[in-house]
Image (cartoon, helix red, strand yellow):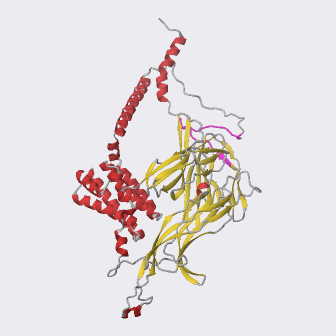
C-alpha cells in the first residue's frame, strides 16, 4: 500500500527532529545588560579577599561601587575586559565581559552589609545585588596577639631593667609626621591627579608601614611607582627635616562635586633619646646627649583629609562624538596602503590612541564599513606605563575585514574626540574618507576567480552571477543514506559520552574531602602567583597574608582539617601520617614559623626578606607536593 505524499513528508519531518536537535550548535540572542557580583560570604579577620563586578555589554560608563565601610581597600578597582566571537553554520554569536575588581581586607570580626553597585548603559542605570559578609576571628596561628619574640628581644636592654612608665619618651607631632598633597584641587571630571603621601622626620626612623589606606570613594585609582630610597631635605618653621615619598597614587574623579580623600594611617618606629636615671655617682658627669641611651618608640601617624572639588566638563564646544575620554592623546587610523586588495582576502585596519590619562577608559571608534565587508570583532590591546609622573600608554583596536566581492568601496569619514584638561578644550580628530579598489579574488569553495561587478555601495544594484550551481542526480536523497546514519550514530555516541562524563564529575564533586585534597596544590600555587604580584607592587601586608594562606590553606585542604583547628602539632602529625619524611616535615614547620614571624615582626627585612620568604615557601611547597604524589 502506497502512503500519500503528505503522510510521507510528515514521517520524514518527525524522523529529522532528533538530527536537527543534535546538530544545532547555538543561537545568538540579544543580551540584556546585567551587572553581576562575585564576592565571598565568609572570610577571616585580616585575610585579603577579592570582590568583582561584571557587566556583559559594551558602552557602559559611570560605574559606582558601594561604600566598603569597615573594610580596608588594598587596591582597586582594577578594570579588565574579555570578548569572544563565533561563526557557526552561518550564524554568529559573541560575548563580552567588563569587570571591576577590588582587593579588600576586614581588620575586625563581625557582620557587614554592603549596598548595590550601579553602572550606566545607554542612558539607563543597572544595579547589582547587595551582599552580606561574615568576618570570623582569625585562626590562633594567625592572630597578632600571640606576642613577638623579636620585638621582646629588641626592647630588652642588656644589663638594665626595662624602662618604667616615667622613662618612656613620646614622639612629638613636630618631630615626625606625614602629609598628603595633590597637584590640583579643582580638576575636571576624569582628569588625572597625582596624590602624594610624604613622611617628614627630624629624628631617626627605624622603619614604617602603611597601616590603613584610604578608600578614595568617587575616584578611579591607580598605584604609581616610587623610589623608596630617595630622600631629600627641607626646612619647615626654621627646622631641618628629611622627607621621602612613601605612596603615590593617580586618581580620576568619576563625577562632579566635592569629594573627600580620607586620611592614610602609618605606623612608624622612631629612635629617641631616653632619660637617664640619676644614681648620684661620679659617672653622672657624662649625662649628656652623647652618652644618653636611645629608645625605640612606636608612633601612629595620620595624614589630613583633603577635599577635591571636581568640575563638570564644559557643555560649550562639546562635539557629538565625545564619549567621556579625558586626557592628552594622539589618534591614528591606518592600514597597509601598499597591499593589493582582493576579494575574499583579509585587510587589517588599526586604530590607535596614545597619550596620558586613564588608558582603560579609551572606547572603540564608530567605524562604518561597507555592508559587503565581513567585519570581525576587533582585537583590543591596552599598553599601560605607570611611573611616578602618572599613567600613560596606548589602546590599539585591530579590525580584520574581508571584502566578498570586487569593486570600489568607501569607508566613510568619522570623528573621535577627547577633552584636554591642560588647554580646557575639546579636541576632535577627523578621520578622512578611505576609498578601496577591491580586485577579483578566488572563490573559497571552488578556488576559481570571482568575477564580481562594480559596486557603488548604494545597495540598489545587484551583482550578475556568472557561475552555475552544482547539480545533483535525481532521486539522490541525504535522508536515510549511509552518511545520515553515520552522523546520527556519531552524535548519539557523543551525547552518551557527555552524559557519562557529567555523571562522573558530579560524583567527584560530591566528595568534598576528596575535592579539597585534589585542589590543595592548585590553590596553594594560586596564592603564590598572587604573592608574586603583591611582591612586585610592594604590598607588604597583603604579601604575607597570601604566603600564609598558601601554606596553611594547603595543609587544611590536604589534611582535611579546618584552618581554625590547625596548629603546628597537628600539622606535623598530619604530614607524617601522609608519609612525608620527618626532615621535610620539620622544614615545612620551620617555614610556617618563619612566615608568621616575618608577618607580625615590626623589624622585618623589607623587600629582601619578602623575596627570601617567597623562595623558601615556594621550594618547600613543591617538595611536599612531590612527596605526596
The location of residue 174, given as percent across then percent down, is 55, 78
Q: Residue 601 in magenta?
A: no
Q: Which residues are magenta?
A: 435-457
Left or right, residue 454 beside residue 233: right
Work out whether residue 283 or residue 183 is closer to the camera in this orientation and state it.
Answer: 283
Which secondary structure is most common in the magenta stretch? loop
The location of residue 355, given as percent across then percent down, is 62, 62
Work out whether residue 36 or residue 626 is closer to the camera in this orientation and state it.
Answer: 36
* Residue 509 visible: yes
Q: Is residue 338 above or below residue 513?
A: below
Left or right, residue 295 beside residue 70: left
Q: Is residue 393 above or below residue 366?
A: below
Q: Is residue 495 above or below residue 57?
A: above
Quick one: which residue is furthest to the front in this view? 280
The location of residue 57, given as percent across then percent down, is 59, 44
Q: Residue at x 36, y 63 (%)?
A: 146
Q: Is residue 350 above or below residue 154?
A: above
**Within the image, what quadrant is residue 611 found in?**
bottom left
**Within the image, what quadrant is residue 196 found in?**
bottom right
Amino acid at each position: 500500500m502506497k502512503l500519500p505524499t503528505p503522510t510521507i513528508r510528515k514521517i520524514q519531518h518527525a524522523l529529522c527532529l532528533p538530527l536537527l536537535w543534535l546538530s544545532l550548535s547555538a543561537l545568538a540572542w540579544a543580551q540584556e545588560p546585567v551587572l553581576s557580583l562575585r564576592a565571598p560570604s565568609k572570610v577571616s579577620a585580616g585575610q585579603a579577599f577579592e570582590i568583582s563586578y561584571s557587566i556583559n555589554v559594551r558602552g557602559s560608563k559611570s560605574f559606582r561601587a558601594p561604600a566598603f565601610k569597615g573594610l580596608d581597600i588594598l587596591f582597586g578597582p582594577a578594570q579588565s575586559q574579555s570578548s569572544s566571537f563565533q561563526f557557526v553554520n552561518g550564524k554568529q554569536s559573541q560575548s563580552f565581559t567588563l569587570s571591576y575588581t577590588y582587593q579588600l581586607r576586614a581588620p575586625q570580626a563581625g557582620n557587614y552589609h554592603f549596598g548595590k553597585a550601579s553602572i550606566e548603559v545607554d542612558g539607563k542605570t543597572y544595579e547589582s545585588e547587595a551582599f552580606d559578609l561574615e568576618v570570623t576571628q582569625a585562626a590562633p596561628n594567625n592572630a597578632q596577639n600571640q606576642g613577638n619574640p623579636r620585638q621582646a628581644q629588641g626592647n630588652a636592654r642588656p644589663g638594665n631593667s626595662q624602662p618604667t612608665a616615667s622613662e618612656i619618651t613620646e614622639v612629638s607631632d613636630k618631630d615626625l609626621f606625614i602629609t598628603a598633597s595633590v597637584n590640583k584641587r579643582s580638576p575636571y571630571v576624569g582628569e588625572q591627579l597625582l596624590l602624594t603621601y610624604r613622611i617628614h622626620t627630624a629624628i631617626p626612623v627605624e622603619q614604617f608601614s602603611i597601616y590603613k589606606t584610604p578608600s578614595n570613594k568617587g575616584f578611579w585609582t591607580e598605584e604609581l611607582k616610587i623610589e623608596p630610597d630617595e630622600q631629600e631635605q627641607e626646612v619647615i618653621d626654621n627646622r631641618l627635616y628629611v622627607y621621602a615619598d612613601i605612596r603615590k597614587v593617580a586618581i580620576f574623579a568619576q563625577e562632579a562635586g566635592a569629594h573627600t580623600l580620607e586620611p592614610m594611617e602609618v605606623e612608624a618606629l622612631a629612635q629617641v633619646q631616653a632619660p637617664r636615671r640619676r644614681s648620684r655617682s661620679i659617672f653622672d658627669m657624662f649625662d649628656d646627649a652623647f652618652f644618653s641611651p636611645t629608645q625605640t618608640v612606636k608612633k601612629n601617624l595620620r595624614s589630613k583629609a583633603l577635599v577635591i572639588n571636581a568640575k563638570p566638563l564644559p557643555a560649550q564646544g562639546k562635539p557629538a562624538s565625545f564619549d567621556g575620554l579625558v586626557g592628552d592623546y594622539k589618534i591614528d587610523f591606518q592600514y597597509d596602503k601598499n597591499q593589493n586588495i582582493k576579494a575574499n582576502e583579509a585587510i587589517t585596519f588599526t586604530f590607535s590612541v596614545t597619550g596620558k590619562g586613564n588608558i582603560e577608559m579609551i572606547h572603540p571608534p564608530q567605524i562604518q564599513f561597507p555592508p559587503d565587508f565581513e567585519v570581525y570583532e576587533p582585537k583590543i590591546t591596552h599598553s599601560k606605563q605607570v611611573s611616578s609622573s602618572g599613567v600613560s600608554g596606548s589602546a590599539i583596536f585591530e579590525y580584520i575585514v574581508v571584502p566578498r566581492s570586487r569593486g570600489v568601496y568607501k569607508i566613510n569619514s568619522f570623528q573621535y574626540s577627547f577633552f584636554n584638561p591642560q588647554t580646557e578644550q575639546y579636541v576632535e580628530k577627523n578621520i578622512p574618507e578611505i576609498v578601496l579598489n577591491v580586485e577579483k579574488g578566488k572563490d573559497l569553495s571552488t578556488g576559481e576567480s570571482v568575477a564580481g561587478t562594480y559596486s557603488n555601495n548604494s545597495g540598489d544594484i545587484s551583482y550578475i552571477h556568472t557561475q552555475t550551481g552544482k547539480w545533483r542526480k535525481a532521486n539522490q536523497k541525504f535522508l536515510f543514506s549511509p552518511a545520515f546514519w553515520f552522523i546520527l550514530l556519531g552524535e548519539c555516541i557523543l551525547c552518551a559520552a557527555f552524559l557519562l562524563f557529567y555523571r562522573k564529575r558530579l560524583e567527584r564533586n560530591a566528595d568534598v574531602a576528596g575535592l579539597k585534597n585534589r585542589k590543595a596544590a592548585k590553590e596553594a600555587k594560586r596564592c603564590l602567583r598572587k604573592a608574586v604580584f603583591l611582591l612586585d607592587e610592594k604590598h607588604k601586608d597583603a604579601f604575607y597574608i597570601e604566603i600564609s594562606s598558601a601554606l596553611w590553606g594547603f595543609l587544611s585542604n590536604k589534611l582535611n582539617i579546618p584552618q581554625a583547628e590547625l596548629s603546628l602539632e597537628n600539622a606535623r602529625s598530619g604530614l607524617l601520617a601522609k608519609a612525608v619524611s620527618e626532615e621535610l616535615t620539620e622544614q615545612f614547620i620551620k617555614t610556617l614559623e618563619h612566615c608568621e614571624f616575618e608577618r607580625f615582626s615590626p623589624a622585618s627585612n623589607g623587600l629582601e626578606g619578602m623575596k627570601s620568604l617567597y623562595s623558601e615557601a615556594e621550594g618547600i611547597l613543591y617538595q611536599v607536593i612531590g612527596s605526596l604524589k
